[in-house]
Amino acid sequence: MSTIAVIAIVVAVLIVLAILVSMMRRAQQRRELGRVQEDARHDDARHHRERADESRTEAAIAEERAKRAKVEAELDDERARSREDELSER
């Protein structure tokens, strides 16, 4: 074989190896990107779950405050009636 043929074969093999290495790196980067995106989706779902729990807690607190306000209003009505009754008896 001539020297030029050997050099051409070696260059071709090196080019093929460079292409294979490049393809392997791209595949690895795609897999890593896929893992990162999956983690981000899990984090997003967890965030939405936490927000829903916070909203439920806030709703429960608001409901409890509303109940207290209702009871206080009823108590104030009772006190007002009691005072009116006292005044009307005099």
Image (tube, helix red, strand yellow):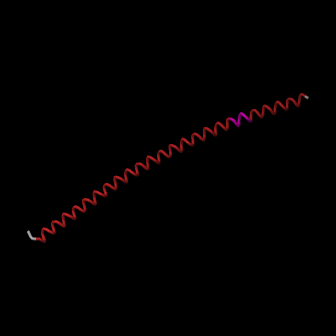
Say which quarter of the image contains residue 12: bottom left
Image x and y of residue 60, in percent? 60, 38
Quarter of the image that includes the N terminus:
bottom left
Q: Is residue 10 magenta?
A: no
Instruction: Say which residue appears at 13% left-offset and 71% top-offset.
Output: 4
In the figure, is residue 25 to the left or right of 65?
left
Instruction: Say which residue appears at 69% left-offset and 35% top-offset.
Output: 68
Say which quarter of the image contains residue 73: top right
Specify start and end residues of the magenta stretch as a single range.
Answer: 68-72
In the rendered image, the residue lying farthest to the top is 89
Residue 75 position (above or below residue 24)? above
Image x and y of residue 71, in percent? 71, 33
Image x and y of residue 31, in percent? 34, 52
Q: Is residue 70 magenta?
A: yes
In the figure, is residue 25 to the left or right of 53?
left
In the figure, is residue 76 to the left or right of 55?
right
Instruction: Say which residue appears at 81% left-offset and 33% top-offset.
Output: 80
In the rendered image, the residue lying farthest to the right is 90
Image x and y of residue 65, in percent? 67, 38
Task: Give the camera-side residue of 21 and 49.
Answer: 21
Q: How many marks?
A: 0
Say which quarter of the image contains residue 62: top right
Decide whether the magenta segment is chiefly helix, strand or loop: helix
Task: Give the camera-side residue of 89 and 10.
Answer: 10
Quarter of the image that includes the C terminus:
top right
In the figure, is residue 78 to the left or right of 50?
right
